[in-house]
Image (cartoon, helix red, strand yellow):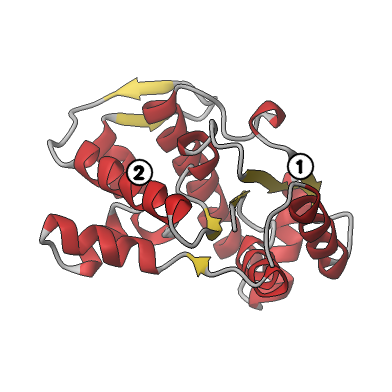
Amino acid sequence: MGIVTVSASYGAAGAEIAPTVAERLGLPFHDRAIPVRVAGRLGVPVEEAEANDETVVRGLWRLVASLGTMPDPVGAVVPGTPLPDARAYREQTERVLAEIAEGDGGVVLGRAAAMVLRDRPDALHVRLDGPREQRLSAAVARSGRPREEVAREMAAADRGREAYVRHFYRCDPAAAGHYHLVVDTTALPLDTCVELVVAAARGRGLGG
């Protein structure tokens, strides 16, 4: 069946596009179930696993601090004091991703899955992105929340996810070379973005 990994910057509609792609391809969608499985393996509450999950916005700064890395205002990384369990969460997440790929496959949102599964021939790696201001406007329109509030959350999410990938995988998650397909979701209707990803997946022989 194969696996589609979807990396999405904040405001790029990953939460809308990825499950729709899964439905169109007849594949399972994997998102919130991943920290649940990680929690079970580590014997911790689900809330604790979510707080150490790359995709859950509210836990990103806690996670970044536990990695011993914190981006400064110009994007450099400042060393800190790592906590002993950060790698355990990452390792268990990698194992879950490998099991998904070896099993029924599916569409995975986030979790640096393109880096974890980069060597698999039965995978399509997708990046959803767009200019910052356009992503911010799209996120405000979808959420209906104040622009300043969304802007703060967006900055924390983007920088936190970048720090996660740079720390564990020594690369930039936005670099196009990690992906088979990069889509500016702020420049196209979401239905068109879905069609592009579905067409690319089927072009690689993935899905039903």
Position in image of residue 106 (x %, y %): 55, 61
Q: Nearer the viewer, residue 53 or 107?
A: 107
Disc 2 residue crowd, few under 14, some 14–19, many 20+, Cα 10 Å: many
Q: Residue at x 66, y 75 (%)?
A: 23
Q: Residue at x 84, y 70 (%)?
A: 191
Position in image of residue 43 (x %, y %): 10, 61
The nearer-to-camera label among 2 and 1 is: 2
Picture quadrant where residue 150 is located: bottom right
Element carrying mark 1:
strand
The residue pinned by badge 1 equals 182
Position in image of residue 198 (x %, y %): 77, 60
Q: Image check: 81 left or right of 148?
A: left
Tell me, for residue 163, which label it has, or none: none
Q: Nearer the viewer, residue 1 or 19?
A: 1
Q: Residue at x 83, y 56 (%)?
A: 199
Position in image of residue 187 (x %, y %): 88, 54
Amino acid type shown at disc 1: Val
Q: Nearer the viewer, residue 196 or 54?
A: 196
Amino acid type shown at disc 2: Glu
Name the image quarter holding the N terminus. bottom right
Does residue 159 appear anywhere in the picture? Answer: yes
The residue pinned by badge 2 equals 94
Q: Image check: 119 left or right of 34?
A: right
Disc 1 residue crowd, few under 14, some 14–19, many 20+, Cα 10 Å: many
